[in-house]
Image: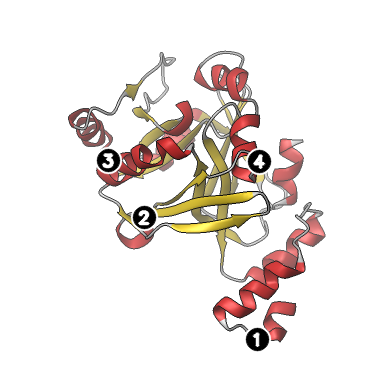
Amino acid sequence: RLEHMLRTLGFVPVGRHRRKRVTRWRQGEINLVINCDPEGFARSFDVAHGVAACAVGLRVPDPAAALVRAASLQIATFSQSVAPGEYPMPAVLGVGESLVYFMPEAQTAAIWDSEFEPLPVADTSGAGLRWIDHFTQVTRDNELASWLLFYVAMFRAGKTRQIEVPDPVGRTISQAIDTAGGRMRVVLNAPQGEQTLASRFIESAGGAGVQQIAFATDDIFATAERLAVLGVETLQVPANYYAALTAEFGLTSELVQR
């Protein structure tokens, strides 16, 4: 089901790990790694949380320096055994028992090529998705300040003002964090009611974690048309959402209708 969803979003499998049941899916600059290996951290995470994003990978100039910074901030690091020829990806513990991996920016392409056997790709046209714009993590209200501090301190990130996101049965406090130039953006959501969508996510996923991944595109209308051809399953969005957009941003009715 997960692979079917990825295909309807325009992703294609481009590599298979040489020693593990791990597949690399790609579109534009986006890499999604599907780990079905019966051993290791990803398997343990799956047992505890179900199908979920167990880790995010960040390209950094110097992974060793990132680990030194993490240690100075008393942020817990993570490591597991690696097979001969595998890159020992340094990592720290992140939100909801997930991991944040550090990839060496100058060597990333070489690591992909050495660890993954290329797969024949019939169609690389995709749907026009270019890169990951941001990802959203949901955490409990009493943990929001801690995770804000984690991102701001570890990555010297800035943060926006907190906003309230309305929910039919409550509200959610939301705050965005980004690094200089917007190369990494994270949104943290903390539900204020037990029946909100964010709260239900925490309960179903066995704790905090990645709830949303937002992909950037140069032309959202062209992408939407391509996704429809690929058969993507979309959410049914109520009309009052678009009415709120019109009122808040002064959009034309023609644009909103489209």
How far separated are the C-alphas under marks 2 and 3? 12 Å
The vertical placement of 153 against 233, above or below, is above
* Residue placed most toward the observer, 84 or 100: 100
Residue 177 locus on image (x, y percent)? 38, 53
Q: Earlier in the sequence, mark 1 or mark 3?
A: 3
Residue bearing mark 3: 154
Q: Earlier in the sequence, mark 4 or mark 1?
A: 4
The extreme left residue here reads 72
Residue, x 64% and y 72% (percent of image)? 244
- What's the mark number on residue 252? 1
Residue 153 locus on image (x, y percent)? 25, 43
Residue 140 locus on image (x, y percent)? 49, 36
The vertical placement of 9 against 47, above or below, is below
Left or right? Give the position of 24 relative to 152.
right
Dot 2 amino acid type = Asp
Please name the colour scheme applied to the rendered image. secondary structure
Q: Earlier in the sequence, mark 2 or mark 1?
A: 2
Give the quadrant of residue 211.
top right
Q: Secondary structure at mark 3?
A: helix
Residue bearing mark 2: 178
How far separated are the C-alphas under marks 3 and 4? 32 Å
- Looking at the rendered image, the quarter that the C terminus falls into is bottom right
Residue 190 locus on image (x, y percent)? 49, 44
Q: Earlier in the sequence, mark 2 or mark 4?
A: 2
Q: Secondary structure at mark 4?
A: loop
Q: Earlier in the sequence, mark 3 or mark 4?
A: 3
Residue bearing mark 4: 195
**Mark 4 Cα-neighbour bin, 10 Å: few <14, some 14–19, many ≥20:** some
